[in-house]
Image: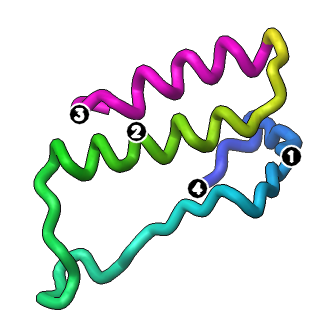
């Protein structure tokens, strides 16, 4: 149930043909390669770093990028 007092912020879509993030629903299938948590976290962190390098360097982005990169490499994130 949506809170009537909450606001929906306008978000801009960032389109970059060089970056692709995929979410797989086949994690439980036998054909998919099983990664342990550390390997998957490292792979995700590398993808995030590759993505943030494509963003424009602004004061706002710099702070958000720092937080995103730190959390992407954290297993507890």
Q: Residues within 10 Å of mark 4 (few under 14, many from 20)?
A: few
Q: Which residue is mark 2?
A: 45
In this orientation, which residue lies closer to the viewer: 76 or 20?
Answer: 20
Which of the two marks, 2 or 1, is nearer to us in this view? Answer: 2
- Percent position (x, y) of residue 21? 54, 61
Q: CA distance from mark 1 to mark 4?
A: 25 Å
> Can you give x and y, in whole percent of width and height, for residue 45 in the image?
40, 38
The residue that label 3 is drawn on is 75
Q: Report the Cα–Cα distance between label 3 and label 2.
A: 10 Å
Residue 61 part of the magenta-drawn span: yes
> How far apart are labels 2 and 1 at the CA level?
22 Å
Q: Are marks 3 and 4 in contact (CB under 8 Å)?
A: no
Q: Residues within 10 Å of mark 3 (few under 14, many from 20)?
A: few
Q: Pointer 2: residues within 10 angstroms few (<14), some, or many (20+)?
A: some
Quarter of the image with the C terminus is top left
**Depth-wise, is mark 4 or mark 2 nearer the camera?**
2
Q: Say above or below: 73 vs 33.
A: above
Q: Is residue 62 above or below residue 2?
A: above
How far apart marks 3 and 4 lie (CA) works out to: 30 Å
At a point 60% along the width and 62% down the height, the residue shown is: 20
Q: Is residue 61 left or right of residue 43?
A: right
Precedes in sequence: disc 2 or disc 1: 1
Q: Is residue 2 above or below residue 27?
A: above
Q: Which residue is mark 1?
A: 12
Q: Is residue 62 left or right of residue 21?
A: right
Tag 4 residue: 1
The dot on residue 62 is none
- What residue range appears in magenta? 60-77
**Are the two marked residues, 1 and 3, in contact with CB atoms closer than 8 angstroms?**
no
């Amino acid at each position: 149930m949506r809170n009537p007092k909450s606001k929906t912020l306008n978000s801009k879509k960032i389109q970059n043909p060089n970056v692709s993030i995929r979410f797989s629903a086949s994690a439980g299938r036998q054909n998919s390669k099983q990664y342990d948590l550390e390997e998957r976290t490292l792979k995700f962190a590398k993808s995030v770093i590759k993505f943030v390098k494509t963003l424009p360097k602004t004061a706002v982005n710099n702070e958000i990028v720092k937080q995103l990169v730190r959390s992407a490499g954290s297993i507890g994130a």
